[in-house]
Image: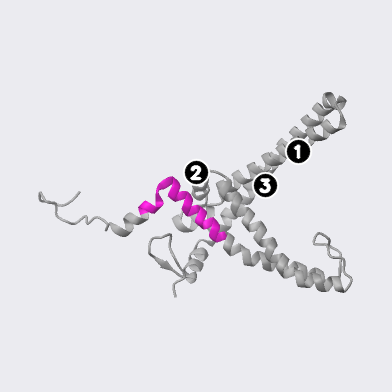
Amino acid sequence: APDGDDAGSGHLFRVGEVYRAVRGRLGDLLGAILLLVLLGAFAATILYLVLAVLAVGYVAIHITFLKVLPLSIQIICGSLVGLLLFGGLLWCGLLLSRRLVCVPQILLVEERGVFAAIGRSFALGGGSVTQIGALLLFWFFTDWSIWFLLILPVAWYGYLEGIEINPFSAEGPLWYLITQQTLSQLSQIVVAPVALVGFALLYQDTRIRMEGFDVELLAQRILSPPNRDAACPLGGREP
């Protein structure tokens, strides 16, 4: 039975077809992942250097001007600077993610090369970062919610056995640690396909907003391709 509709074009696809498409472009996908990791590491290094310079500048300003102010004012100023730095770091991360999130879809749907796919993803990702932010928040909270539902019976049993329940602690019986890590991986496996569907929909929505992709698909469904061999009304053939 068919498993979906290809971007509204009326072509029904199956999971096996998607698997074969991914297998056919596996080398390009691995190359794109490697390049994206390198780009992410380079961007993280630049952000780290910028944050270090800003932190040193704030410390110098604090020692020079803010040290004579009351402690409450110093705490408020430090908190505001910290929030601004965190907001700027978060915005830069979302902006970079928005620029690169469409690379797998471009590789599979448009069948472009690795560098061409990255360049096109940068071109398509020039919009708002709210959508990618909402998708990442959905991924995070859904993952944690499923993990919490799975770990709750185990944690309750461990509490009855006298185990100190702390999700951020690496101490405890071996069986509890193994179960905790297994359920964490299971929750990620459950949520990952849903998140990937969200990224695919984001790619389609971006193309619709920027290129009128839905109009192109509708024209392909309604209008038949031109017949180059058809005779012109004035004689001869169409150019």
Q: Which residues are magenta?
A: 196-216
In front of the other: 226 or 136: 136
* Rendered residue at 63%/67% (across/down): 190
Residue denoted by label 3: 41
Query: Which numbered disc, 1 or 2, marks the residue that appears first in the sequence?
Result: 1
Disc 2 crowd rating (10 Å Cα; few below 14, some 14-19, many 20+) is few
Q: Give residue 82's mark.
A: 1
Disc 1 crowd rating (10 Å Cα; few below 14, some 14-19, many 20+) is few
Distance in Å between CA atoms under marks 1 and 2 = 32 Å
On the picture, is 72 further left or further right than 217? Answer: right
* Rendered residue at 47%/54% (across/down): 204
Q: Give residue 123's mark.
A: 2
Residue 175 in view: no
Seen in the picture, residue 185 relative to 85 is either above or below; the reply is below
Residue 38 in view: yes
On the picture, is 136 further left or further right than 228? Answer: right
Please identify the quarter of the rendering in which residue 176 is found.
bottom right
Kind of element beneath mark 3: helix
* Rendered residue at 43%/62% (across/down): 6
Residue 26 location (% of width, % of height) = 54, 62
